[in-house]
Structures are given as C-alpha cells and as structure tokens.
Amino acid sequence: MRLRLIVCLTALLVVFAAPAWALHEGEFALAPQAGMVTTSGVPGGLFAADFGYGAGFGYGITDIFGVELDLLYSEHEELDEDETGELKLTHFFGGIGPRVNWNTQYVVPYLALLGAVSFLRYQADWEIGKNSFDDQQDAHAFGGALAGGLDVYVADGFTVGLAGRAGFLGSNLTYKHRDTDDGDAGAFGYFAGLLRLTLLF
C-alpha cells in the first residue's frame, strides 16, 4: 500500500501543462481510485476508518453533462475491542447518477449526484466469562451520495486527482456484540476521501 501511495504522490509532483480535454460527448472515463472510507451512526460509529479501493466509470452525454458509476470496497474493524469484542464490517458501495464537469485546459472540477446501494457483512466475536459468542449478518442499504473532485492533467487523456464522497443510506442490518443483544442499524453516513487516476478515451 505504501508503494502505491508513493507512486501516486510522485505522479502528482510531475504534473505538466499538457492541453487536453474533459469528458466530452461520446467519450468514456475509467478511474481506478483508493483512499480512506468511514461510516457514522449505528453501527457505523463502532468501526474505525479504513482503506478502500474501487473504480469510477463515466460517459459523456454532452460536453459538460454525463453519467458516473462509482464502486468502492472497504473492510472496517472495531474502535474499542474491550467494549464490543472483535468486530468486522465488510462494505461494498455502488452509486450511479448524473455528473457535471467543467471544461478547462488543464484541470477538470466535477460534481455528481449518485443514487446508492450498499452490501454489508457484519461479523462479531466476543467472550463473557468462559462463554464465547458470535454474530454474522448480511444486509443491504439504499440512499444517495454527493460526489465531487478535481482532476489535474498529467498528459493528454490522463489525469490525477482528489475526490470525495458523502452519502446517507438506510439499511436493514441487525446486529449483536458484547454490550448489545439486539441492535437495529437503521440509517448511517458514508464518507470517502480518494486519490483517482483517470483515463479518458
């Protein structure tokens, strides 16, 4: 992971001003992405932020308006093992929606409004006295997210940029851990800060 981060940061440092284009009509964008992902609420507040990775895909309907598909996968562990026992939350996030980008010569700022779905796997293991307990639940969530970022051209048709995701989803997850016998997750917040490499073709 450290090597990938060094390579990405080096790419940012060698950016040069090569005139290029944003996502124009009829063009595609492929954007591998990685960064920190966190959740809030319950049970999101039980878990620490973790490294996530995925990809974004874009298609230009006009020169400034397009569609973006966003996929991210992350795994989160407990914040306080003494309080909850060992926890693990596996989270797959997918969002799709309209994207607006601004055509400039060297950088591309953009915004997208995504309808989102998440698939969750919750796992818990804890001990009380000499007894061991566990819980595993699969669930899904629906909601939306606002996505935005700024891409800088490294070469013609290739950009490096920073992006963010902020969403709100409602889930059907129920869960147990050391201090909770029967919890209902309900709605939770979803946040990601990402480094993206984008190929335009």
Image (tube, rainbow, N blue to C red):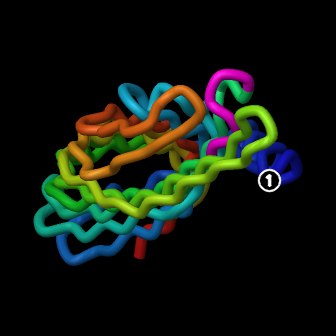
- Closer to the camera, 109 or 15? 109
**Where is mark 1, residue-wise?**
4
x, y percent for residue 50: 64, 40
- Quarter holding residue 181: top left
Q: Is residue 94 above or below residue 49?
A: below
User: Within the image, what quadrant is residue 93 found in?
Assistant: bottom left
User: Is residue 163 something one can see in this rendering?
Assistant: yes
In the picture as drawn, the residue positioned furthest to the right comes out as 3
Left or right: where 85 falls relative to 10: left
Would residue 16 be seen by someone viewing this image from the given angle? Answer: no
Residue 175 lies, in percent from the top left, at 42, 45
Residue at 27% in and 61% down: 68
How far across and down, in percent of the image, does residue 43 sit? Answer: 43, 34
> Looking at the image, which is closer to me, 158 or 166?
166
> In the rendered view, does 178 fall on the left or right side of 140?
right
Residue 125: x percent and y percent? 67, 47
Q: Quadrant of the C terminus?
A: bottom left
Label 1: state its secondary structure: helix
Left/right placement of residue 90 relative to residue 112 reads: right
Amino acid type indicated by mark 1: Arg
Query: Which portion, as a residue range, is magenta?
Result: 82-87
Q: Residue at x 47, y 26 (%)?
A: 45
- Residue at coordinates 24% horizontally, 38% vertically from top-left? 186
Please report the residue visible at 32 percent of the width from the left and 42 percent of the height from the top: 104
